[in-house]
Structures are given as C-alpha cells and as structure tokens.
Image: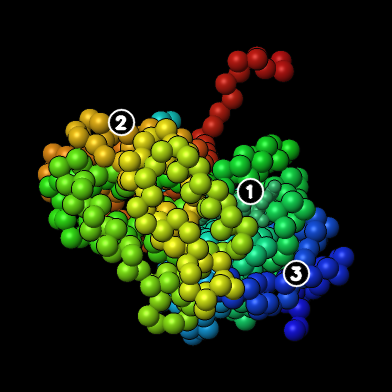
Amino acid sequence: MQTKKMFINGKWVGSESGETREIINPYNSEVIAVVSEGSAADSQKAINAARKAFDSGIWSNLTGIERASYLFKINELILRDHEELSRLESLDTGKTVEESRWDMDGIADIFKYYAFLASDDCGYIIDSPFPDTSSKAVFEPVGVCGQISPWNYPLLQASWKMAPALAAGCTIVMKPSEITPLTAIKITELCQEAGIPDGVVNLVLGPGIGVGSELAESNDVDLISFTGGIVTGKKIMQAAASNVKKIALELGGKNPNIIFADCDFDTALDFALNAVFFHAGQICSAGARLMVEDKIHDQFVSELKKRIEKIKIGSGFDDSTQMGPLISEEHRSKIEDYVKLAIKEGAVLETGGKRPDDENLKNGFFYLPTLFTNCTADMEIVKEESFGPVITVEKFSSDKEALKLANNTEYGLSAGFWTNSPARIDKFSKGLRFGTIWVNDFNVYYPKAPWGGYKQSGIGRELGREGFGEYCEIKHIFQNFSNKPMNWFGTSE
Ligand code: NAD
C-alpha cells in the first residue's frame, strides 16, 4: 500500500522520522490506508511554510474577490468528487454513505458561503465624533492558523475551519484526527488542484501530542482553532498562552431533548431517534439526554424502545443500514464503561447495553442502540458525553423543573424541545443556556447560522459571519483631515 503523505509548502512529504500509521476500517478492522506519522518537527516545518506564505502577502494581499475565486473552485471540485469523498469518509468512519453525502453537501456549501463573505465583508464605517475626520474598522487576516479537528465529522469539522480562514486571507496548518485523515488528505489535493499558492494550505498528520500540541504551543502560530473533547481543549488553552494566541474552541456537548406532552408525538418520537442514533451517537450535538413530561412518559418510552429495537446496524455501504459501527475498539470500551456505571448508579437498561450477537459484525466496533430509563441528573451517564448510541430518559412534571434540569450541566452546546405552546416556546428559547436551540426539530446546522457553545462547550463560534470573524483582526483606522497643534506642552519658543 502506498503511503499517503503530508503536504507542506506545496509538496507531498513523508515524516521526518519516516514513521507511518495504519488506518483501520471500523466496520471490519481491516487496514484501508497507510499514512505518514508526523511529529512536532513536521508541524514546525509546516508552521514555517505557513508563516513564510503569510508574511509574503501571496494570499493575504489578494483581493477578497481573488480569494473567493479559489474557494468557488474548491466548491466545484468537491461537487465533482462528491461521491468519492462520501465513500472515503464512510470507509474511514463507518458512518452510512448517505450520511457522508449529507456531510459533503454541507462542505461544498461552506466553501461557497465563505467565498461570498471573502468578497463582501471587509469592514464598516464608524460615525466619528470629531469634525473633519474619518473613522473606519477594517478586517484583516489574523495570520497563521493551526486547525485541529476530531474523528467524528472529519471533513465537515475541518471545512468549518479551512473555508473561513482562507476567505479571510489566513494561511493554515491542518491537523485531522490521526485515526481519520483520509478526506483531509483528499481535500488538500483539491486545494492543490484549485491552484492555491504553496504554503497557504499545509497538512500535517499524526498524534495530538507532538503534531497537535506543537501547533498550540508555537509562537509562530497566531490562532489555534480546535474541535474535540473538553480535556484536550483545556490543554490547548494552556498551551496557547505561550504567545497569547487567539483561540477558538468547539468542545463537547450533553444536549437535552425535551418532550412536552402537547408536542406532535410521532414527529418528536422520530426525531428522538434521529437526535441520538445518527452516526451511532458520535455527534457533539447528539440529543442523548431525553427529558419527557410525565403525562406521556410511559407511552413515549414504550414506543421509543420498540423503534430502537428495529434499528438496522451494519456496513455503512449497505443501503439498508441505518447505523454503522463506532470509530474504534478503544471508543467502544469507553462506552461499555459508561453503560456499566449507569447500571451501577441505578439507571434501568431497557434495551441494548451490549455488542450485537450477529457473527457478520464481529470484526467491527459495533454496539447496540441502548436505552436507559429512571435516569437522574446526577448520574455520570446523564452528565457526561458517552459519545455513543446511548440515550437516557429523565421524567419531569413542570416547565420550571424541565428548565432547571436542562440547564443543570457544565456543557452548553445545543438543546431542543418539542411543544405546540407559543408561550412555552418563548420561555424555553430564552431560558435555555445553550449556543443553539432547536424548536420542534433537532440537529439542524447550515453555513449561515453561527455554531458554538455556552459554558464549557467552547469559546467563539464557527459558521456564519461570526465564524469568519474568528479569523479576522479588526483594525480601527482614524484619519484627521485638518489637524493642528494643541500646544498642551507649550511650543519650542
Ligand atoms: P480529542 O480531543 O481526543 O481529539 C481531537 C483532536 O485533538 C485530534 O486531532 C487529536 O489528535 C488532537 N489532540 C489530542 N490531544 C492533543 C493535544 N494535547 N494537543 C493538541 N491536539 C491534541 O477528541 P476526539 O475524540 O477526536 O473527538 C470527540 C470530541 O470532539 C467529543 O468530545 C465531541 O463532543 C467533540 N466535538 C465537538 C464538536 C463541536 O462542534 N462542538 C464537533 C465534533 C466533535
């Protein structure tokens, strides 16, 4: 198998150490690719290339319209290779190809959206309080950006960082998760094909400690954007202090999905499944924490259980599969530990809670969709992200209780609720302390709407104008057209 390499200063290069890593198919544990395994030294080379490219102005001095033309080209290339990218993403992550196709639709749109912003959003005029002066704020690129992404949505998460950074005029060093680098390699090839100048887009491969930490620590990096877990996020914050680099953190979530008795029962039930079992629950915004009003609790749970037991798990490449495997053996063990703990803490296991018996799935990292009832807010399985196909149900009896329970979390990424009461919609839209609120829907995101977390779910926003703003410095330019001496300190006479 030919080793896939890193991309530094416009060239595909192996790692300094010559080490490689095997990439595993989570469906059957087979090796699907071999890639270069970098270290801090490789990151430093990529940072140097990005620094040189930024300082040369080869990218930052282009007009917004010129940069936009490259982003439009990348959008076209993604659409051209849409099916290949989708299949590659599914091979690497195990998710169904249809889910990967949705990802690729979104990724193509991201490049198009930020192409428009690149050519449009350059600053604003300020109403100066002084006569004969002008005052304006202009947006300038932050500089060299380190971009670290996770394994669950490998290319989607990377594109939320790449597109706005390039649109703003920054140069980038991307570091995908070491276990899912294939689509990041492919999009780098597309950037090369689009003719992006050497050194503007760089790709390093390898582990968090070494390759990723170097990006967070280096004094030559001006901004670090990270999507991943809270523990790593906190380390990145500390490392970023070295040169007070700007940080953008998209961390985990424990997202309540609140079902009121006056909801549209069938739709809420359908979405209770969608909210948590897409991509086997490996979604930062998964609605893994279901809260159901007592009046409909028993009926809702009984229907939910029936439907969960019918979920078809298997290969992401089989059209009838509804849920694929987990990403790795290590991740499956973590979920198994959470499930054991939940049982110990008194949650009632209604269904799932184990690996499937199906012999055909024994080489993959499969886990059955799992439902727990009798859950309470103090249980670890309710407080923490299991990041798997596990749904917990809490019962509530009043609006006040529901709001209090839902906000009782250190996370603040997203929340959804289902009701037909306008007054309740208003109360919960305002009262829930999360970065995104879905009313009678769940897990909807698109390029124009800002995405990010309150509390420990992160700092800053991706997507939307705010996502572009993360990659911009704002410079205030004040000009006086008729300045005269003040003579406060006298004159030379
Ligand atoms: P992770 O924190 O283990 O790793 C994420 C990335 O950070 C990987 O590329 C990894 O190699 C790198 N990394 C690890 N240690 C590092 C270090 N010390 N310095 C620099 N880089 C380091 O997370 P994961 O397991 O890959 O992803 C799952 C997590 O991501 C979940 O918590 C999930 O909620 C979160 N997530 C959040 C969002 C969001 O939009 N808020 C989206 C997707 C995933």
| Residue 59: x %, y % from top left | 64, 65
- Check residue 223 in the rendering and tell me which mark sits there, or answer none: 1
187 with respect to 370 (left or right): right
Q: How is the image coloured?
A: rainbow
Of marks 1 and 2, the one in the foreground: 2
Instruction: Mark 2 and mark 3 in contact? Answer it, CB < 8 Å.
Output: no
Quarter of the rendering occupied by the N terminus? bottom right
Q: CA distance from mark 1 to mark 2?
A: 36 Å
| Upstream in sequence: badge 2 or badge 3 | 3
Along the viewing direction, whichever of 204 and 21 lies nearer the viewer: 21
Q: Amino acid at mark 1?
A: Leu
Mark 1 closeness class: few <14, some 14–19, many ≥20 residues within 10 Å: many
Q: Amino acid at mark 3?
A: Arg
Residue denoted by label 2: 404
Mark 3 closeness class: few <14, some 14–19, many ≥20 residues within 10 Å: some
Q: Amino acid at mark 2?
A: Lys
Mark 2 closeness class: few <14, some 14–19, many ≥20 residues within 10 Å: few
The residue under the point 32% across, 34% down is 405
Along the viewing direction, whichever of 86 and 473 lies nearer the viewer: 86
Residue denoted by label 3: 21
| Residue 418: x %, y % from top left | 21, 49
Question: Judging from the image, what secondary structure is the residue with disc 3 in?
Answer: strand
| Residue 18: x %, y % from top left | 86, 70
Question: Judging from the image, what secondary structure is the residue with disc 2 in?
Answer: helix
The residue under the point 79% across, 73% down is 13
- Check residue 346 in the rendering and tell me which mark sits there, or answer none: none
Res. 454 visible in picture: no
| Residue 197: x %, y % from top left | 67, 72
The residue under the point 45% across, 43% down is 343
Q: CA distance from mark 2 to mark 3?
A: 47 Å
Of marks 3 and 1, the one in the foreground: 3
Q: CA distance from mark 3 to mark 1?
A: 28 Å
